[in-house]
Amino acid sequence: MTDRRHDRPSESHGVSRREFLEAGAVGGLAAAAGIRLPGGRAPGDASPSPVSRLPSPAFELEEITIAELQQGMQSGKWTARSICEAYLQRIESMDRSGPELHAVIETNPDALAIADQLDAERKAKGPRGPMHGIPVLIKDNVGTADKMETTAGSLALVGAKPSKDAFIVQRMRAAGAIILGKANLSEWANFRSTHSSSGWSGRGGQCKNPYALDRNPCGSSSGTGAGISANFAAVGIGTETDGSIVCPSSANSVVGIKPTVGLVSRGGVVPISHNQDTAGPMARCVADAATLLSVLTGVDPDDPFTAQSTGHVAADYTKFLDPNGLKGARIGVARKNFFGYHAATDRIVEAAIDVMRGLGAVIVDPADIPHVGEYDHTESIVLQYDFKHDIAAYLRGLGSATKLKTLADLIAFNEAHKLEEMPYFGQEEFLRSEKRGALTDPEYVKALANNHRLARTEGIDAVMQKHKLDALVAPTGNPPWMTDLVNGDHFLGGSSTPAAVAGYTSVGVPAGYDFGLPVNISFIGGAYSEATLIRLAYAYEQAAKPRRAPQFLATADLTVR
């Protein structure tokens, strides 16, 4: 619901492009609205900084885990306040200046006060749990009823603050997490234009990739992916409709969990599609992603889909972190449509599969997913209908906080503020969605049934049952491309769509690098298979230890593979 199907590869090799991304320039409108832009950049300036190399300064918390932070707070080495101060300084030095990553739209002005309260509580009562005092970055389409904005990156929603926190924010606050700031994203979760540049938003400008600043961070959860990879917080929240968690996780070499639709509430999140939207954790390791997922789940009266998760939720997903979890597991290689578009990506993922084989997994190769590519068109139909309906419901829910109540109102806003909102690409997806009718239209009903049949029953379910699989694996996508505000994104391929359309689970994990540019492997499973996929992904990660911290190079080093 907060990410877009647009965060996925091009139509070639059976993966439909789904335009996404963001846009990024702001001028007089931003100033008039009192918006503070990252890095103090001038209106409309989304170009990379002219730097040759900006290595990361020494940072005490670099690559640190949630467990290590908890140990440090328990011993007295750190406090929640000192941890927040360190991350805020990191954001100031690396996001606002230095490489000017533009991963964080704004930080929480109350973060340190909240940290002080949590430190006092820890001293008096002990920690609430593993997330007590842990700073989290959340995507700017996840609602907060505090001093921060919730805008999906668009100037249209500046000042349109929700009356209450999103359900998952309530859950994180209750667990003692500190919402450190709002992450940049592809504007409207990449559901505005058919040729956008991922990671661009009117509020945040163009987010950069910390591995090579001229490369794209993918979207729509670009700021979360780049920010967590750059060590701007312990963990982060992304959202996905189709690829918006797993693609930026791959481009920024972090772990991304795209949950089953309904496992995690969408209440209070700026929507695209109630049929495919989900929020999920993004982290530098599987253990941290599992820790965050454990506090996100729960039945939310504002999201009826969550009622379906009853009986399918684990109280603690970290109990599935088994380094021997691949032994005897049956892993299918989804080869057709997902291999062959990039030789180095294939090589990296083949090596990852060899690691799994060495850990005792039974590799079924091939185990192709039927009907891939056959529901790309009907996916677009469903998302366009859903968006027109769901965004209007979200806007109405804001009450008097905004005068914009329909998709038509948003389209008119963008036209009225074209220089700020559409300097590089337009709103073709908005216009297509506006032409759609009610959710009772036969076209919509037929398309949705088609998607579920082909992606679920005759797709993922069929191949997993046929081969008695625990999971499918495939390359998440190609290495990050050069950011191109003129022509938009350059996807070669990706594997997000089957699980996205089915509403099923996928987990992306770093697998390797090509010229220093990240590539992930995706573990794909059936409904509510999070526990199984976490077990498998963790076992692979512990054996391969694939992640390398980014170096903030101005451009990729093409002399080193």
Image (spheres, rainbow, N blue to C red):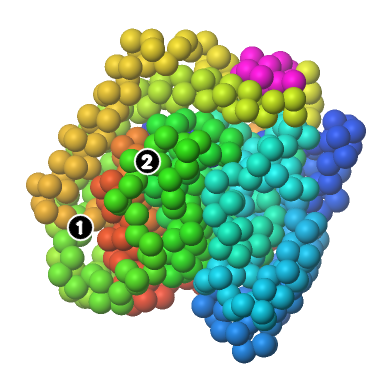
In magenta segment, residue 411: yes
Q: Does the residue at mark 1 contact the one at mark 2 (Cβ under 8 Å)?
A: no
Q: Quadrant of residue 396?
A: top right
Q: Amino acid at mark 2?
A: Ala
Left or right of 240: which side holds 331? Answer: left
Q: Amino acid at mark 1?
A: Asp
Left or right of 90: which side holds 471? Answer: left
Residue at x 66% of width, y 58% of height: 179
Magenta segment, prevailing SS (helix, strand or loop): helix
Magenta residues span 403-415
Label 2 CA crowd tier, 10 Å (few <14, some 14–19, many 20+):
some
Q: Earlier in the sequence, mark 1 or mark 2?
A: 2
The percent coordinates of residue 542 (x first, y second) are 37, 76
Viewer-side residue, 119 vs 431: 119
Return the residue at label 1: 470
Is residue 117 something that shows in the picture?
yes
Return the residue at label 2: 307
